[in-house]
Image (spheres, helix red, strand yellow):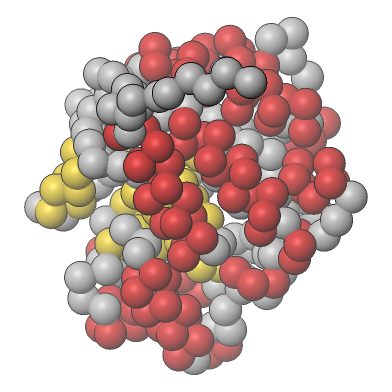
């Protein structure tokens, strides 16, 4: 954990303590076209049984949060209306919470109206890939709702973002741009903010690796840090494999993120991420407690 990082989040009156390790956020996409098939669930006409089953498995595997999204942000995905997005996510949220009433549900949306409806339906966190840049009402809405908010770095829109992946220094520019948005949110009195550097969003693989290698730079903020690299193209393109084959690579980069102070990992594969958190926790707590014997040849 980072020093001076805020350690608790107030999720509808329940305090989530991030001081004893890293929390896992499981990804549930109620979309027909998210980039990793394993995260998609069938949500046809409210048939959310599959979403409930997947949610239950993620909770059993150790997920603290479930992140439910109805708008695919993968490059080339079609735009959908706010009402269609709400029609996808609201039944999933309601059904999951009927079955798993203690689940902490996050809604993955950049639209203030969808965020409000989702929180009214029981979500306790808003995860905004646009960090407030695509809906001018978002900051005011989350400040009014008073729920934890994931402020992610993005340039442009999911459709234009890759053409805007140009930086002189990606780390300082992402920090500056996140800092500007954070100041606006703070000015509205919003308390619980989680920062996300936005891996893969208006970033090349080289940018993503630079951000990960200098993740400690985000200590500048006293906010928890969310890292979402799970099965992203930076992993599988670099390794010459597919998203379906990128679990091992995901675990490697998640481990790096853990060692550099990530407070939340957003993942498709909860059990493996929980294992990484457990093992890295043992390594971190074991520092300086062992007596090393030097063997000479």
Residue 145: give x, y in percent of width and height.
23, 47
The residue positioned 44% from the left and 56% from the top of the image is 275
Closer to the camera, 153 or 296?
296
Q: Residue furthest front?
A: 297
Closer to the camera, 117 or 74?
74
Query: Is residue 107 found left or right of 102 in the rendered image?
Result: right
Which quadrant of the rendered structure holds the N terminus? top left
Image quadrant assignment for residue 32: bottom right
The residue positioned 43% from the left and 85% from the top of the image is 53
Q: Is residue 179 above or below residue 249?
A: above
Which quadrant of the rendered structure holds the C terminus? top right
Residue 50 in sight in this render:
yes
The residue positioned 47% from the left and 79% from the top of the image is 54
Query: Is residue 138 found left or right of 87 in the rendered image?
Result: left
Residue 111: give x, y in percent of width and height.
48, 50
The residue positioned 23% from the left and 41% from the top of the image is 20
Image quadrant assignment for residue 204: top right
Residue 107: give x, y in percent of width and height.
41, 58
Residue 93 in sight in this render:
no
Q: Residue furthest right?
A: 240
Q: Is residue 129 above or below residue 62?
A: above
Disc tally is 0
Closer to the camera, 128 or 282?
282
Residue 296: give x, y in percent of width and height.
57, 18
Query: Is residue 251 found left or right of 60 in the rendered image?
Result: right
Q: Residue furthest left?
A: 13
């Amino acid at each position: 954990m980072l020093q001076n990082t805020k350690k608790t989040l107030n999720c509808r009156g329940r305090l989530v303590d991030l001081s004893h390790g890293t929390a896992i956020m499981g990804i549930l996409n109620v979309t027909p076209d998210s980039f990793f098939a394993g995260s998609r669930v069938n949500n046809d006409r409210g048939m959310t049984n599959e979403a409930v089953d997947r949610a239950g498995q993620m909770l059993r595997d150790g997920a603290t949060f479930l992140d439910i999204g109805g708008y695919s942000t993968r490059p080339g995905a079609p735009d959908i209306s706010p009402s269609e997005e709400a029609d996808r996510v609201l039944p999933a949220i309601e059904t999951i919470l009927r079955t798993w009433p203690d689940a902490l549900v996050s809604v993955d949306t950049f639209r203030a109206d969808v965020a409000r409806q989702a929180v009214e339906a029981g979500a306790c966190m808003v995860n905004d890939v646009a960090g407030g840049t695509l809906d001018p009402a978002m900051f005011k809405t989350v400040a009014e709702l008073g729920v934890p908010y994931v402020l992610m770095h993005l340039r442009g829109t999911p459709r234009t973002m890759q053409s805007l992946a140009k930086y002189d220094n990606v780390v300082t520019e992402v920090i500056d741009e996140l800092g500007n948005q954070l100041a606006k949110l703070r000015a509205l009195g919003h308390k619980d903010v989680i920062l996300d550097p936005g891996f893969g969003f208006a970033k090349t693989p080289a940018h993503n690796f630079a951000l990960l290698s200098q993740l400690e730079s985000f200590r500048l903020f006293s906010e928890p840090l969310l890292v979402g690299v799970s099965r992203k193209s930076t992993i599988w393109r670099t390794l010459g494999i597919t998203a379906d084959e990128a679990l091992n690579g995901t675990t490697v980069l998640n481990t790096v993120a853990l060692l550099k102070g990530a407070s939340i990992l957003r993942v498709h594969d909860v059990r493996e991420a929980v294992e990484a958190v457990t093992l890295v926790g043992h390594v971190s707590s074991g520092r300086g407690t062992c007596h090393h014997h030097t063997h000479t040849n």
